[in-house]
Amino acid sequence: MAMVKKSITVTDQQDAWLKAQISAGHYGNESEVLRELIRERQLREQEAQREVEWIRARLIEGERSGFTDQTPAEILQEIKSGLGRDDL
């Protein structure tokens, strides 16, 4: 994978944290720390996108299923039971 050299500016507190991560032996250098943080953020964004897609699919499924004669309380109870939580 090609690498691109970047120059960044951090606060004194952030610099101390970066150095502490390296001193603790978690990483070999500051670039490793920053790349790991970026990878973690990318994973979180991917997970969030998958969640949005799942919700969107459930909404479309719900719209296609038509109307119901259930009361709001009955719908809520069905949701709670499906989650295995009657205490919500």
Image (spheres, rainbow, N blue to C red):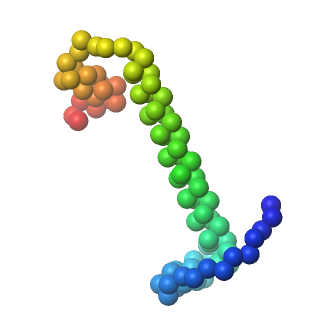
Horizontal side, residue 32 vs residue 49: left or right:
right
Residue 34 shows in the view:
yes
Give the image location of residue 83, x and y in percent. 34, 30
Residue 46 position (above or below residue 41)? above
Please count the marks in the image.
0
Q: Nearer the viewer, residue 32 or 38?
A: 38
| Residue drawn at x 40%, y 15% as measured from the top left | 65
Residue 24 shows in the view:
no
Give the image location of residue 43, x and y in percent. 58, 52
Residue 82 position (above or below residue 17)? above
Give the image location of residue 80, x and y in percent. 28, 28
Look at the image and tell me in which quarter the N terminus lies: bottom right
Q: Nearer the viewer, residue 18 or 4?
A: 4
Horizontal side, residue 9 vs residue 69: left or right:
right
Residue 56 position (above or below residue 11)? above
Q: Quadrant of residue 72?
A: top left
Q: Nearer the viewer, residue 52 or 31?
A: 52
| Residue drawn at x 60%, y 63% as measured from the top left | 38
| Residue drawn at x 48%, y 40% as measured from the top left | 51
Give the image location of residue 36, x and y in percent. 62, 65
Q: Quadrant of residue 66?
A: top left
Residue 16 position (above or below residue 52)? below
Residue sitting farthest toward the right: 2
